[in-house]
Image (cartoon, rainbow, N blue to C red):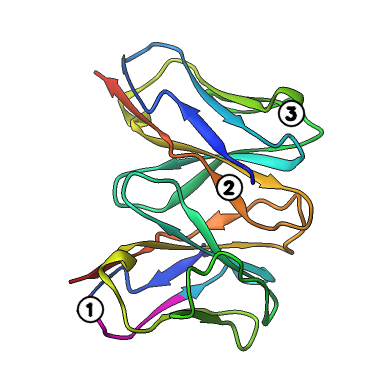
Amino acid sequence: GAGVSQTPSNKVTEKGKYVELRCDPISGHTALYWYRQSLGQGPEFLIYFQGTGAADDSGLPNDRFFAVRPEGSVSTLKIQRTERGDSAVYLCASSPSGRAYDEQFFGPGTRLTVL
Amino acid sequence: KQEVTQIPAALSVPEGENLVLNCSFTDSAIYNLQWFRQDPGKGLTSLLLIQSSQREQTSGRLNASLDKSSGRSTLYIAASQPGDSATYLCAVHSGAGSYQLTFGKGTKLSVIP
């Protein structure tokens, strides 16, 4: 079946603008995760959804970042007043149930560049 | 706070060699450990998942071992091929109600034909 998909694959924006990044998880997966990967680093956790609710948002760097998953499937990561330091690859992952032993499956990522 | 370290940061080997990539983590209370492959400009491809109760997992030419008590995992690649060239990332799923993966910075592997 289809894997995790993310759109757009690339996004270039200007400092101060608002952006939305979309994630489509594997069908039937209830758990969804967002990570951010800066150049030369491993991915860092941002937020975890179980169904429609954010079960853990401890990785969001500040209140300019927000994510939603209104119907328990597609998720949108929203970044307000973008800064150059927000430039990174934003990765989305899903897992069947969010249980501790679940494998996480990653999408191709969205490369965000803030000029 | 869980920290994951991968050594070496980069590795270059001639085709056909067997090689070992290392991963260490500071908190041994983990649920599982995943090895991923990342090609340039691409997302992560899961290679192997080892649950905390397991000692190793194998898939084709790949074998991953886990020593939870010492906080170490190794990824063994047999008979390396140029197509194995990529960055390999290790990630642990820690316990205590955490759902996130904590990643190392990766090992960049180059297999020379």
- Residue B14 lies within the magenta run: no
Identify the residue position indicated by label 2 in the image.
B102
Q: Where is residue A54 in the image (x, y as percent from the top left)?
A: 66, 76
Q: Measuring from the top left, give residue B17's x and y in whole percent.
A: 39, 11
- Disc 3 crowd rating (10 Å Cα; few below 14, some 14-19, many 20+) is many
The quarter of the picture where the C terminus of chain B appears is top left
**C-alpha span from label 3 to label 1:** 44 Å
How many discs mark residues in the rendered view?
3
**Residue sitting nearer the eye, B57 or A42:** A42
At numbered mark 1, what does the secondary structure look like: helix, strand or loop? Answer: loop
Horizontal and vertical percent position of residue A71: 63, 87
Instruction: Give the mark toward the camera: 2 or 1.
Output: 1
- Magenta stretch, residue numbers: A13-22
Residue beneath disc 3? B68
Chain bearing mark 3: B
Question: Residue lying farthest bottom?
Answer: A70
Mark 3 residue type: Lys
- The reply to the same-chain question for discs 3 and 1 is no
How crowded is the residue under tag 1: few (<14 C-alpha within 10 Å), some, or many (20+)? some
Q: Is residue A15 magenta?
A: yes
Q: Which amino acid does label 1 sit on?
A: Lys
| Residue under numbered circle 1 | A15
Tell me which corner region of the image, top left, top right, bottom left or bottom right, holds residue A98: bottom right
Decide if residue A83 is on the left or right side of residue B98.
Answer: left
Q: Where is residue B27 in the image (x, y as percent from the top left)?
A: 70, 37
Which residue is depicted at the point 27% across and 85% down?
A17
In the figure, A79 relative to B90: above or below? below
